[in-house]
Image (cartoon, helix red, strand yellow):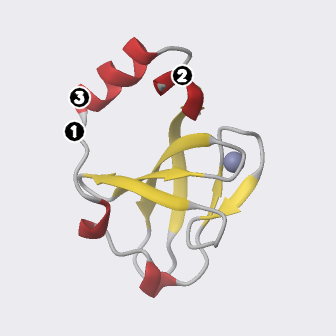
Amino acid sequence: MEILNNKEEVREKLKNNPLQAAHLLRLNGYGSIKYKCACGETHDANGKDVSCKGSAKPFKALLKCSNNFVTMIKIEGFFRKKAISEYGFKASIMD
Ligand SMILES: [Zn+2]
């Protein structure tokens, strides 16, 4: 996973892969989807401590965890979903 260190890098990523509303991606029906977070821990994309901040095409979600890190995951698989972490950053760099 790529770790972004400043606002410009985040903007550049989002320019190439624009964010859409979080509700366009429905993760709820898939049960637990574990992903590697930018904070170093592994979370469940459907966990209570994780909130979905946006989605992107084709099947990506921008997730924020309770440690205040944001991670873009790509969901793969048909019956069994798995999440590939593409990049992440500390939420505070966007303040
Ligand atoms: Zn985390």
Q: Is residue 66 left or right of residue 77?
A: right
Q: Quadrant of residue 59?
A: bottom left
Residue behind mark 3: 16
Secondary structure under the numbered disc 2 in the rendered image: helix
Report the amino acid beneath label 1.
Answer: Pro
Report the amino acid beneath label 2.
Answer: Ile
Residue at 45%, 59% in the rendered image: 52
Residue at 32%, 22% in the rendered image: 11
Q: Which mark is residue 93?
A: 2
Secondary structure under the numbered disc 3 in the rendered image: helix
**Quadrant the N terminus occupies:** top right
Q: Is residue 36 left or right of residue 9?
A: right
Residue sitting nearer the eye, 4 or 95: 95
Residue 84 at x, y = what percent? 53, 51
Of badges 3 and 1, the one in the foreground is 1
Find the distance from the CA under tag 2 to the CA under tag 3: 19 Å
Disc 1 crowd, CA 10 A, few/some/many (<14, 14-19, 20+): few
Disc 3 crowd, CA 10 A, few/some/many (<14, 14-19, 20+): few
Residue behind mark 1: 18
Find the distance from the CA under tag 2 to the CA under tag 1: 19 Å
Report the amino acid beneath label 3.
Answer: Asn
Residue at 66%, 64% in the rendered image: 49
Residue 32 at x, y = what percent? 61, 78
The residue carrying mark 2 has its beta carbon less than 8 Å from ligand 1 = no
Disc 2 crowd, CA 10 A, few/some/many (<14, 14-19, 20+): few
Residue sitting nearer the eye, 84 or 29: 29
As drawn, 51 above or below 92: below
User: Which one is earlier in the sequence, the residue at label 2 or at label 1?
Assistant: 1
